[in-house]
Amino acid sequence: MTGLFSLSKHSSPPHASSQSTTHKFSDTLMEDTLKNAEEIIKRWDLNESSSNLFQDNRTEAKQFLDAVIDLQHAMQFVVKESSTSQLLVRAQNLMKIAMKRLQKEFYTILAGNRYFLDSESGSRESTRSSGSDEDQGSEDDNAEIEARFAEISIADEGEKVSVAVDLKAIADCMIEAGYGKECSKIYELNRKSVIEETLYYLGVENISPSTVQKMEWKDLEKKIKIWLNAVKVAVSTLFYGERILCDQVFSISDSIRESCFTGIAKDSALTLFTFPEMVAKYKKLSLEKMFRILDLYDSISELLSEIEVIFGFDSTVAVKSQALTSMAKLRDAARAMLAEFESAIKKDSSKVVAGGGIHPLTRYVMNYLIFLSDYSGPVSDIIADWKAVVKSPLPESYLLSPIAYDGDSPSCIVSVRLTWLILVLLCKLDGKAGFYGDVPLSYLFLANNLNYVVSKVRQSSLKLLLGPDWLSNHESKVEQYMANFKRMGWSSVMTSLPENSTAEISPAEAKECFCKFSLSFEETYWKQRSWVIPDPKLRDEVKISLAKKILSAYRPFYHKYGEKVAWMESGGGVESILRFAPDNVQNYLSDLFHGSSENSSTTSSSHGSSSRSTPTWSSPPQCR
């Protein structure tokens, strides 16, 4: 009992003994950890070694990181158990040495792999657009960019992954050690400069709205071409790759990876997507500039889903908003130009062309609409919700096409709009036809121009939008116009012959018929010799049709009564009465509808028609 009492009386309380044991354990743990960590950390102290740890000795690099992590865990344990331990001071000093080394390694890896680290650099696309030949200038401008990216593309994918892994390992270690701010600052400064430099090489500039307004269109168009070439590379390669890399390196901390990516990419992305808005607000926009507006709109539209993913953080919502704002402004500009286009057709006051040929307005409008049809995607977006402003006055029967009529489908929206614009053109041409003052020539003008419209539709993507029903209906109208031209333009020739060319009539009556035929044929020929049918196929069809119609009546009449009239006029003057043999009539007809009379002989020869010289008549028929 005495022994037990004595023990109870002089020994420490149980909790004090436990606390002492814990202190000893924490000190022992810290001592052992410091001993193991000091050896490798001090060996790579920046004051002792200028070598690159991760480049020169990857095995020790792993040991270094493990030692830092162990030291951090030990420090956390000791702080909880004995915050006044002197060993903590040694540990903190050692941690500072380690962090300085890791900061240098982090910076060195970033600086040595600026472009190599672009996660998509190995598959960079050509910065040239697939645009038309007129973009040759911008292709030359981008040659340097392509050469630069070609060098990047040869990088080994495995090595790139290794570099990213090293960065992540260092970032994880520094963040766990409480040095996340220092780590992210190094990363952000380096990668932001990569973004800015790459955009510079892509030709993207930070231009003010006032500068854009002062620019001549040719200079602004060059910048638009550069932007169009750059935007896909910037979004799909540069920003996308940067987002992936940032997510990989800072996967341990959602807040750091968001703040880093925002700091790196936000300003540059805003610069990139502000440019289209400034173009949309350009005060000198006109109809011919429409297609650059559509190019800009289409580029953003195609990339919008990627933009929404890449800039999905709350802190980068301004980038998505700017892209959408630019699209909205481009949409407004395109709508204004479409309205101006329709108004320009209606207000056109240009004169009719000589000979009933293709009017310049027809060529301009159809070429414009063909270009528009190639942009059916963006055009449908632009006019999709424009119904309240522009209500088509077309009857549904006029709009029905081979595709099922659905007023809300994108293709139907574009079809309705383009159909309406063509109708506006045709109505305008109908009004111009009246200025000829010659009804047959008016019909020839309408036939030529409508045939041109139909041909352009058939040969372009307009064919798919307007459909076979539209084509069939308007081809029938061409035939109708041409039938009216032939009937009214050659009626005097046809009525000069008896209805039944083989019916019995007196030689005097036959002579009168020959005289009327010669007079009317000569008059009609000279009148129509300057008229034109530009389409070779249509021209041949008309000439064959006229020859068939005229000669089917004239040939049998000539063979039956020609000799009788010649015998009756044996005293002289028969040549002026029987001046057109049937073969001559066909030759003269083949000389028609090539346009200018001065060039008709050459023209007809070049088209395989009669090569004879221009016909001349010394005197009118002797009809008495």
Image (cartoon, grey):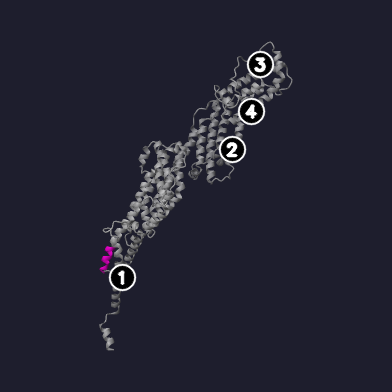
| Distance from the alpha carbon under mark 2 to that under mark 3 | 47 Å
Which of the two marks, 4 or 3, is nearer to us in this view? 4
The picture places residue 89, in percent across and down from the top left corner, at: 26, 66
Which of the 4 image quadrants contains residue 589?
Answer: top right
The picture places residue 175, in percent across and down from the top left corner, at: 34, 60
Q: Which residue is mark 1?
A: 29
Q: Image quadrant for the C terminus? A: top right
Mark 2: amino acid:
Leu
Q: Which residue is mark 2?
A: 471
> Of callouts 2 and 1, which one flags the residue occurring earlier in the amino acid sequence?
1
Q: Which residue is mark 3?
A: 577
| Distance from the alpha carbon under mark 4 to that under mark 1 | 110 Å
Answer whether residue 13 is magenta in the image: no
| Distance from the alpha carbon under mark 2 to that under mark 4 | 24 Å
Q: Please, which residue is most extreme toward the top here?
A: 571
Residue at left offset 56%, top offset 22%: 597
